[in-house]
């Protein structure tokens, strides 16, 4: 497959033509290349997936680690200009899934901050996820060992921050509470 052809603005149709090893996201048609994550980032993601995955074993919802494509505002002609690959994505509506990922708003998105993406995760992705109708958005900061949870209900946002020794309930997965100590424990 070809590498990225340089353009001013990109769409999901362009993403489909890129080499599968290229990791990039689109925001209003602008491409943001993604660098490989740090080891601690992957450790946090793994522990979260273990806890979420165990809970979902007998449930209809599914959890997917990055790279997993999410088209927040899918267009039939593939002209959508926003495409993301969250660190962890949970989808409870199977009709949103196809062979390439999720079409529409997932129920839960989890992003783990990296120095190069922190402002993107906290500002641009925050707004996009809220606009798309994502119900719950988690932002984990491995350096300060805290989790900020955002619950979206239209324009209303409820926020709560959890520390390393606490448990954080998952609002969209009734009965699941994530133990944060093992999430933030360095190997």
Image (cartoon, helix red, strand yellow):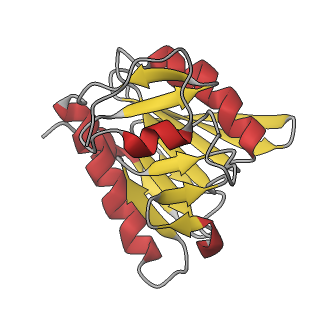
The residue sitting at the left extreme is: 187
**On the picture, is 161 further left or further right than 58?**
right
**Residue 39, how many percent across, how many down?**
17, 33
Residue 146 shows up from this direction = no
Please tell me how many numbered marks the rendered image carries: 0
| Placement of the C terminus among the 4 image quadrants | top left
Residue 59 vs 157, above or below: the answer is: below
Residue 106 vs 2, above or below: the answer is: below
Residue 163 vs 94, above or below: the answer is: above
**Residue 96, how many percent across, how many down?**
62, 65
**On the picture, is 56 further left or further right than 184?**
right
**On the picture, is 162 further left or further right than 74?**
left
For this rendering, which residue is in front, 23 or 36? 23
The residue sitting at the bottom extreme is: 58
The residue sitting at the right extreme is: 155
**Residue 83, how many percent across, how many down?**
54, 38
Question: Residue at left 25%, top 43%?
Answer: 1
Residue 175 shows up from this direction = yes
Question: Residue at left 65%, top 40%?
Answer: 80
The part of the image, by quadrant, that contains residue 29 is top right
For this rendering, which residue is in front, 2 or 73? 2
**Residue 11, how many percent across, how many down?**
56, 34
The part of the image, by quadrant, that contains residue 164 is top left
For this rendering, which residue is in front, 17 or 67? 17
Question: Residue at left 66%, top 54%?
Answer: 104
The part of the image, by quadrant, that contains residue 52 is bottom left
Question: Residue at left 46%, top 74%?
Answer: 56
For this rendering, which residue is in front, 173 or 15? 15
């Amino acid at each position: 497959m070809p590498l990225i052809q340089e353009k001013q603005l990109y769409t999901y149709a362009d993403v489909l033509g890129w080499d599968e090893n290229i990791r990039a996201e689109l925001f209003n048609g602008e491409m943001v290349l993604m660098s490989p994550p740090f080891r601690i980032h992957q450790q946090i993601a793994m522990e979260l997936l273990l806890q979420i995955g165990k809970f979902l074993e007998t449930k209809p919802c599914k959890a997917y680690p990055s790279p997993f494509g999410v088209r927040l505002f899918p267009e039939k002609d593939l002209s959508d200009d926003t495409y993301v690959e969250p660190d962890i994505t949970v989808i409870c509506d199977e009709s949103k899934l196809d062979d390439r990922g999720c079409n529409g708003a997932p129920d839960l998105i989890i992003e783990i901050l990296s120095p190069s993406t922190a402002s993107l995760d906290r500002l641009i992705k925050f707004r996009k996820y809220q606009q798309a109708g994502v119900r719950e958005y988690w932002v984990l900061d491995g350096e300060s060992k805290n989790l900020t949870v955002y619950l979206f209900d239209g324009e209303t946002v409820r926020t709560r921050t959890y520390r390393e020794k606490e448990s954080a309930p998952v609002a969209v997965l009734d009965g699941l509470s994530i133990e944060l100590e093992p999430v933030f424990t360095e190997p």
